[in-house]
Structures are given as C-alpha cells and as structure tokens.
Image (cartoon, grey):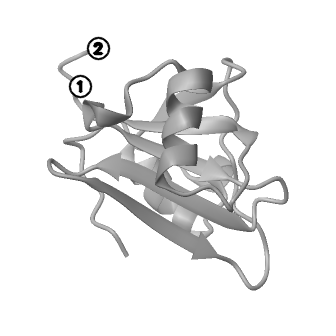
Amino acid sequence: MIALSSQHRYFVFQGAADMRNGFDGLCGLVRDHLGCNPLSGDVFVFFNRPRTHVKILWWDQDGFAIYSKRLERGAFERPAGDDKNSMQISAQTLTLILQGIVLSSVKKRKRFNLAA
C-alpha cells in the first residue's frame, strides 16, 4: 500500500483508462485530457471501464511512480463529479475507495477548516 497524505492533491480521471498504459501513456492522459502537468507532484488516479483495476501515477521528485491494483471480486467506486474529465478528492477519500468502502455510507463529523 502506498502512503497517502494531505501534502498532495489527488485527481480522479473520470473516463475509462486503458490499463495497458504505462508511464508515458498515463502522462499523456494527464496532459491531454486533464490539462495538468504530470511533473507537478499531484497524484492522478485512473480506473478501467468495469472499475476492477486502478492505477495511480505521481511524480516523486526524481521520477514517476505507478501504483496498480486489480480486484479479484467487486469494483472500485468512482466518486461522482461535475467535471467530465477529472475531479479532485482528498487522501482520505482515496483511501476509502481503495479499501472498498461505499462513499455514501461515510458520515463525517464537523471539523474546523481554515480554508472555509
């Protein structure tokens, strides 16, 4: 398992990605469809059409890293978003998705947020 922290921004690609894509193919999706710079240090999450595979791409100071996971049963939940290309999520939400927790069943208690 990778370490997810609030130090990064996390973007979910809303389309279906070809899981045969490697570093260059995923970087192309980031540039062409998300309009982001893959060297930004942001973390990019891709699912295949049936959502049984996930790939996570990020720039780790001196090179790209890919985390890949294939489910033997079930599917990952893709969070619904307004943008047709991508949406930003938190590290906590990505952790819930990877653990198979239904996002609509999660209830968050009120917390102080400096940005709000």
User: Distance from label 2 to label 1 (Cα)?
Assistant: 5 Å
Q: At which x and y percent is residue 3?
A: 27, 65
Q: Mark 2–mark 1 contact, CB under 8 Å?
A: yes
Estimate how packed mark 1 is, as few (under 14), some (14 to 19) or many (20 or more) residues with alpha carbons within 10 Å.
Answer: few
Mark 2 lies on residue: 116
- Image-based side of 1 in relation to 29, left or right: left
Left-right relation of 58 to 76: left
What amino acid type should be assigned to the residue bearing mark 2?
Answer: Ala
Q: Position of residue 83 (x, y in %)?
A: 66, 18
| Residue at far top of view | 116
Q: Which residue is mark 1?
A: 113
Front-most of residues 53 and 33? 33
Camera sees residue 45? yes
Quarter of the image where the C terminus is located: top left
The residue at the point 62 percent across, 68 percent down is 100
Above/below status of 92 relative to 40: below
